[in-house]
Image (cartoon, rainbow, N blue to C red):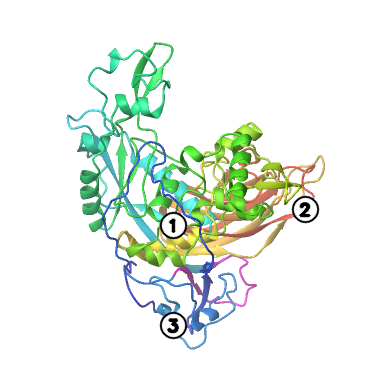
């Protein structure tokens, strides 16, 4: 069922169903924000914004939650029945409502609740993504993106949303043709090399006395991205209800090759998008990684978490100097958090949310910690992906009168946040903060609503907690299980298995037994690559029966580390 831009959501009377709703976090509206110079470019493109473009919101959003919303409870509290039958969900003040809706079928027998799961209906905001494979005007240097790689990237993005308790998910748009190409050198390339590139044999071609700088690269490969063409094509695709993704295989920049004393072209290796652009720029081929998830965050109005540009600290000395600069500029030295936030908590700003984007100011992002960036973290700790969750950036600075004291300053960036530049760390463990999730959902139901559908999906869930005992010293893993019985006819092309297992230490074995009795290994201790032991993700299986008994089996991997028991918190199955 697709209910695009509907203003009323009517739930079947509760003589047949019980209703369970989970409210999204409503961000506060009363905090001051530092100024932010928004940079849309993640690697090469410098100006993806559109001067003079007016974006009009479809509806207003506020931080107020009306009285009706107070009756909406968390999704797991299925026993709380909404009084009075049919419910007008538009009363909560957003369209579609910015919280997760699940309608649960009542149990038909007095069996213990949730022993074999329950049938439910999940509702999602579903964004349609349409990749456009680009070539140069002459049909050369073409994107190699495949449908399988595109699906892998979407699966990763869906996992980020699920891990963040978001109701947003992504799908390949029905209008996508992976065998078609658009020949447009202006969109396919970021710059055009000078005709005699090979004749420049010095690392300082612009003669400014500095070798191999961005200015040198721009001198030899002037920016040539055609934003007008990109916008026109993007607006056409958005008008058809899809997010335009440009798979660009052209030239991104030029680099100095010291081994051959020559300049060489470098293919596009980054992407860009922003809250006001009509497209998402990507590489000529991409697959399961944080790349697409990160750029979609920008398209739905999430800034980076970190300081950008030339002021981004690269060393601890830079970090210290910038803090001293704030104090010299008049900020009290004792306000350690205020100084660090003013310098490095850049996504806190709402000053850029004006005009047609003003409604998004009611969805600030104040819950991501200050982030000086991955370069500083690597300089201090040797590796930005160091799995130790306790590592931070800190410096002790002595100030004379009137302070006459050494003051300690900390920065603890969330290295799992997908909008940080630690995005290549920790594998499939990335997430959004609650207020980032709220901002995205506001954009989804606001000026981006034309590319998003409101859909219902049949699901089967088990929310009964199951304790995972520690592994006996020297013994085999002790498996516990949770079961779900599903219904349907035939086989499902794809099965989505949403798993939420809480385990504070590390190391889990997770297996799934399908209705045919076949055991599938979903996760092992070697797959953890994260900074906590929790596993909250989506696993995908293919061509399995829609009807039958499914069994999730989980065991702790390491006896010597497991001082506390974990638990299977919940899991569910959806068919595609």
Considering every residue shown, the one lying at the far top of the view is 260
Residue neighbourhood size for the residue with mark 3, other residues' Cα within 10 Å, grouped as few (<14), some (14–19), many (≥20) = some
**What residue is pinned by disc 1?**
575
Q: Nearer the viewer, residue 186 or 529?
A: 186
Residue 210 is left or right of residue 20, and the answer is: left
Q: Position of residue 509 (x, y in %)?
A: 65, 45
Residue 285 percent location from the top left of the image: 36, 35
Dot placed on the residue nearer the N-terminal end, 1 or 3: 3
* Dot in front, 1 or 3: 3
Question: Magenta includes 107?
Answer: yes
Quadrant of the image occupied by residue 378: top right
| Quadrant, the C terminus | bottom left
The correct choice, above or below, for 346 with respect to 216 in the image is below
Circles 1 and 3 in contact, beta carbons < 8 Å: no
Please tell me whether the stretch drawn in magenta is mainly helix, strand or loop.
Answer: loop
- Residue assigned mark 3: 87
Q: Does the segment drawn in magenta span residue 133?
A: no
- Determine whether the residue tagged by mark 2 lies in a helix, strand or loop: loop
**Local crowd at mark 2 within 10 Å, few (<14), some, or many (≥20)?**
few
Which residues, given as a range, are shown in magenta?
98-118
Q: Is residue 141 above or below residue 298?
A: above
Sequence order check: which comes first, mark 2 or mark 1?
A: 2
Residue 564 — which label? Answer: 2
- Check whether the beta carbons of the residues at disc 2 and disc 3 lie within 8 A of each other: no
């Amino acid at each position: 069922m697709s209910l695009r831009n509907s203003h009323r959501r009517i739930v079947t009377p509760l003589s047949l169903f019980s209703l369970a709703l989970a409210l999204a976090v409503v961000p506060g509206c009363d905090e001051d924000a530092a100024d932010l110079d928004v940079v849309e470019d993640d690697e090469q493109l410098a100006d993806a914004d559109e001067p003079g473009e007016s974006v009009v919101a479809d509806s207003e959003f506020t931080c107020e939650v009306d009285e009706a919303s107070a009756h909406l409870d968390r999704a797991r509290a299925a026993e709380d029945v909404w009084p009075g039958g049919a419910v007008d969900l538009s009363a909560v003040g957003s369209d579609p409502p910015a919280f997760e809706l699940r309608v649960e079928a009542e149990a038909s027998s007095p069996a213990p609740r949730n022993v074999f799961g329950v049938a439910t209906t999940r509702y999602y905001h579903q964004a349609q993504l349409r990749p456009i494979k680009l070539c140069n005007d002459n049909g050369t240097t073409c994107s190699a993106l495949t449908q399988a790689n595109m699906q892998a990237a979407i699966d990763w993005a869906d996992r980020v949303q699920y891990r963040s308790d978001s109701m947003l998910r992504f799908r390949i748009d029905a209008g996508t043709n992976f065998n078609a190409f658009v020949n447009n050198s202006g969109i396919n390339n970021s710059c055009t090399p000078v005709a005699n590139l090979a004749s420049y044999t010095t690392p300082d071609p612009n003669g400014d006395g500095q070798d191999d700088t961005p200015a040198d690269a721009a001198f030899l490969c002037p920016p040539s991205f055609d934003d007008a063409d990109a916008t026109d094509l993007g607006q056409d695709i958005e008008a058809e209800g899809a997010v335009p993704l440009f798979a660009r295989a052209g030239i991104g920049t030029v680099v100095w090759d010291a081994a051959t004393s020559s300049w060489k072209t470098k293919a596009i290796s980054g992407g860009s998008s922003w809250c006001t652009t009509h497209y998402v720029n990507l590489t000529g081929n991409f697959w399961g990684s944080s790349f697409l998830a990160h750029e979609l965050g920008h398209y739905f109005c999430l800034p980076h978490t970190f300081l950008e540009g030339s002021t981004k600290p690269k060393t601890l000395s830079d970090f210290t100097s910038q803090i001293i600069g704030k104090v010299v500029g008049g900020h009290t030295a004792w306000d350690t958090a205020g100084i660090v936030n003013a310098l490095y908590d850049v996504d806190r700003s709402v000053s850029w949310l004006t005009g047609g984007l003003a409604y998004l100011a009611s969805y600030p992002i104040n819950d991501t910690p200050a982030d000086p960036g991955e370069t500083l973290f690597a300089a201090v700790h040797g590796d930005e992906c160091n799995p130790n969750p306790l590592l931070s950036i800190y410096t002790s600075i002595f100030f004379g009168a009137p302070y006459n004291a050494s003051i300690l300053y900390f920065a603890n960036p969330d290295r799992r946040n997908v909008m940080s530049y630690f995005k290549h760390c920790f594998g499939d463990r990335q997430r959004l903060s609650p207020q980032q999730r709220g901002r995205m959902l506001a954009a989804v139901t606001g000026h981006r609503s034309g590319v998003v559908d409101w859909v219902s999906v049949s699901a089967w869930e088990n929310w009964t907690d199951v304790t995972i005992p520690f592994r006996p010293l020297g013994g085999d893993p002790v498996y516990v299980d949770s079961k779900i019985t599903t219904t349907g006819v035939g086989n499902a092309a794809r099965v989505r298995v949403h798993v939420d297992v809480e385990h504070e230490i590390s190391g889990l074995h997770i297996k799934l037994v399908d209705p045919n009795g076949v055991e599938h290994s979903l996760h092992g201790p070697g797959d953890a690559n994260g900074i906590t032991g929790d596993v909250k993700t989506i696993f995908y299986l293919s061509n399995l029966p829609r009807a039958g008994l499914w069994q999730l089996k989980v065991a702790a991997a390491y006896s010597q580390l497991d001082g506390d028991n974990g638990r299977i918190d919940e899991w569910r199955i959806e068919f595609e």
